[in-house]
Amino acid sequence: MKRSEINRALREMEDTLARYQIQLPPFCHFTPEEWREKGHEYDEVRDNMLGWDITDYGLGDFEKVGFSLITLRNGNHAKQELYPKTYAEKLIYLMEGQHSPNHFHWSKMEDIINRNGGTLLIRVYNSLPDESMDTASDVTVHLDGRAVTVPAGTQVRLTPGMSISIQPRLYHDFDVEPGTGPVVIGEVSQCNDDNTDNRFEPPVGRFPTIEEDEPPYRLLCNEYPPAK
């Protein structure tokens, strides 16, 4: 992705959250210059990859495949003595026409919540013992305390306020129902590790390769400088 694309996506998500009166923690507003002055008091942000995450999955077409995301809180399986949280929380911004690819998590269970905006579509498939996608068997999903069984490949509709629980090894992807507008998504989950706990089908990258065509507006969660 070009840095200018990332900057534009950051500003659009910031503006949308402000319009919906969703407030962000202070570290989400730090400039790159401010990050260079931060000491070890912000190690939890650095070590647990809190903050901004803009990705095109390495496919080079952010308007069609990608999303904007903020990790607000998270634990760390590798450093549990320092960061014992067993939970994580994210905000995701998905534009109309944008797609987040099919994947499952080996370990993490999560709830995906439509916080505001348009109608979110979550396509679901079970997985087989060899981890491939099961395109035949029905899928039981849990929607705000209601169990529903749907055919494989169904796009479950979540209007604002609705949520779905995604258990480990359940394949899912994200789209916005055409004509309904962009969606602010909440994610509440077990401790999150995007470096080791995503299986994409078909395989894609998770973080973008960045072409520096202008200075960064905010640093992404994998770009923080060492503590001063």
Image (tube, rainbow, N blue to C red):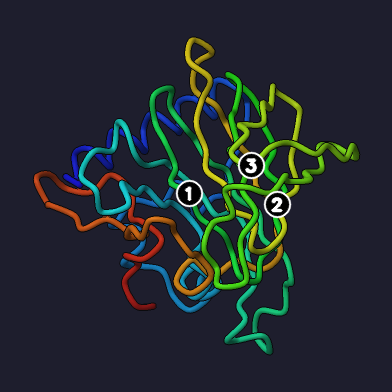
Side (left or right) of 186 relative to 30:
right
**Quadrant in the picture for residue 39:** bottom left
Residue 199 location in percent, x, y? 48, 64
Q: Amino acid at mark 3?
A: Ala
- Residue on which the image places disc 1: 102
For the residues bearing labels 2 and 3, Cβ distance under 8 angstroms: no
| Chain-order first, disc 1 or disc 3 | 1
Tell me what residue is drawn at x 51 percent, y 49 percent.
70
- Residue on which the image places disc 2: 166
CA separation, marks 1 and 3? 13 Å
Q: Amino acid at mark 2?
A: Ile
**Quadrant in the picture for residue 152:** top right
Q: Amino acid at mark 1?
A: Asn
Residue 129 location in percent, x, y? 62, 71
- Residue on which the image places disc 3: 152
Q: Secondary structure at mark 1?
A: strand
Side (left or right) of 26 relative to 161:
left
CA separation, marks 1 and 2? 13 Å
